[in-house]
Amino acid sequence: MTDLTDLGIAAIRDGFRAGDFTARDVAAAFNANIAAADALNAFLVKTPDHALAAADAADAARAAGDAPKPLAGVPIGMKDLFCTTGVATTAASHILEGFVPPYESTVSQNLWDAGAGMLGKLNMDQFAMGSSNETSAFGNVISPWRRNDGGNAALAPGGSSGGSSSAVAARLCPGATGTDTGGSIRQPAAFTGISGIKPTYGRCSRWGTIAFASSLDQAGPMARDVRDCAIMLGAMAGFDRKDATSLHLDVPAWEAGLSANLTGKRIGIPREYRVDGMPAEIEALWQQGIDWLRDAGAEIVEVSLPHTKYALPAYYIIAPAEASSNLARYDGVRYGLRDLPEGAGLQDMYAATRADGFGDEVKRRIMIGTYVLSAGFYDAYYTQAQKVRTLIARDFERAWEQCDLLLTPTAPSAAFGLGEKSDDPIAMYLNDVFTVPSSLAGLPAMSVPGGLDHQGLPLGLQIIGRPLDEQGVLNASLAIEERAGFVARPDRWW
Ligand code: GLN
């Protein structure tokens, strides 16, 4: 019998409906893989019973002849940024230790309503701040990939959704939720040879998702291929009156609309994304991507996004500013940790709780954010960054006059080793150079695997689309996927 954990979301869904296997068998197989993969540290909480209960419900419904739900029989992993009723949710921060939400995030609820089950809560960078998973308070996630140099250096799975990327790449779940504020779905997908899409800002409700930078945060799926992402995104997205920024639009039938024929599409190549120091292999893969898209029928045009170089500095003002405000709520009163030294007053409790509860990177962001929002500096930094954000959005609007979609590399390098960048925040932030501009503009963007570098590590290509054109993004990504024929998998060492 095939190993059920080799199947992706579409294959599980279809095989389950056809009666090839039970949902319980699928859930049990993934639970077993997870139990044997503690070395990856991908899960903060395992919830095998949640997955089995959803599977049993799916099996019972199938036996009763009920119409199958879209994700019946499919178990998934849930990034620990999504609140889940009765299941500890910490955003990988010590300050939320002990917090068990009495409510469910809209995105996770949508997935359960679609029939999915939860295998567990996935490790991540603390409060989704980071690009390597090294800021988790519960130990970094380790990528299942290793360099082909015979060494066994532990590599970063990307971040912040590194538990999600590691778990999907290691066959611990067929799909997982991610969130993307400045690249946290796309960069970890690229590092681990999987696919991930950040939809248009507002497609997925932010309600019940722990906030990092509210004007940027978007949920999205991470899975083995484009079709699986289309299926999962269809279940996650939708209008939600509990989120004021949720788009009041129907969810398109993305899976049904999949087509790798790009005839009539114009793909823009932004010249400013050729950054100094980018490895020749990434440049070569980008060229390969251009050839693939042309082969799929697209016309290639060079475009200019002149304010690209200001995107990263603007992001690293706006995101910390919003974070400093959002994270003010963790004061030792309402959630998780409370440090109350003997005889301490209220202010002392706030200070002790926050000093002890937040990790260094989170504190760095709170300090930067507080600084750029303070009287006297507000106009010089925050207002200026907001203006730059508008200019970046305008760059994209101009580009859309010449093209329908954009092709870029996802990240400026393949996965790096744990510890290689963790003491240099600027080097870490530079990882987001290709993902941040589309986040600032709220655009849909996807990473798909394009190939391997000389070390045998995955590299991703990114497709960026117009607002609400997830279908165009998915279809161009599919055209790349079909031509790249990416089948490499990490050897199982864990
Ligand atoms: N790496 C970026 C940061 O640290 C993006 C994180 C994210 O998208 N959540 O802010």
Image (cartoon, rainbow, N blue to C red):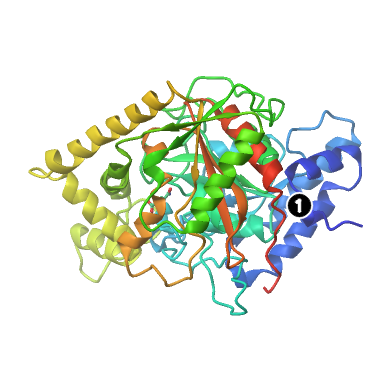
Q: Residue at x 56, y 55 (%)?
A: 459
Give the vertical position of 439 relative to 155 (above or below): above
Residue topped by disc 1: 52
Give the vertical position of 189 relative to 65 (above or below): below
Of residues 162 and 352, the one drawn nearer to the viewer in this rendering: 162
Under tag 1, what secondary structure?
Answer: helix
Question: Percent x, y for residue 201?
Answer: 45, 32
Residue 157, by quadrant, is bottom right
Question: Percent x, y for residue 424?
Answer: 32, 66
Residue 109, by quadrant, is top right
Q: Residue at x 42, y 40 (%)?
A: 217
In this picture, residue 461 sits left or right of residue 309? right
Q: Residues within 10 Å of mark 1 (few under 14, many from 20)?
A: many
In this picture, residue 416 sits left or right of residue 361? right
Q: Is residue 278 visible?
A: yes
Q: Give the quadrant of the C terminus.
A: bottom right
Question: Percent x, y for residue 373?
Answer: 18, 44
Say what amino acid the circle numbered 1 marks.
Leu
In this picture, residue 384 sits left or right of residue 280? left
Q: Residue at x 66, y 33 (%)?
A: 296
Give the vertical position of 338 relative to 256 (above or below): below
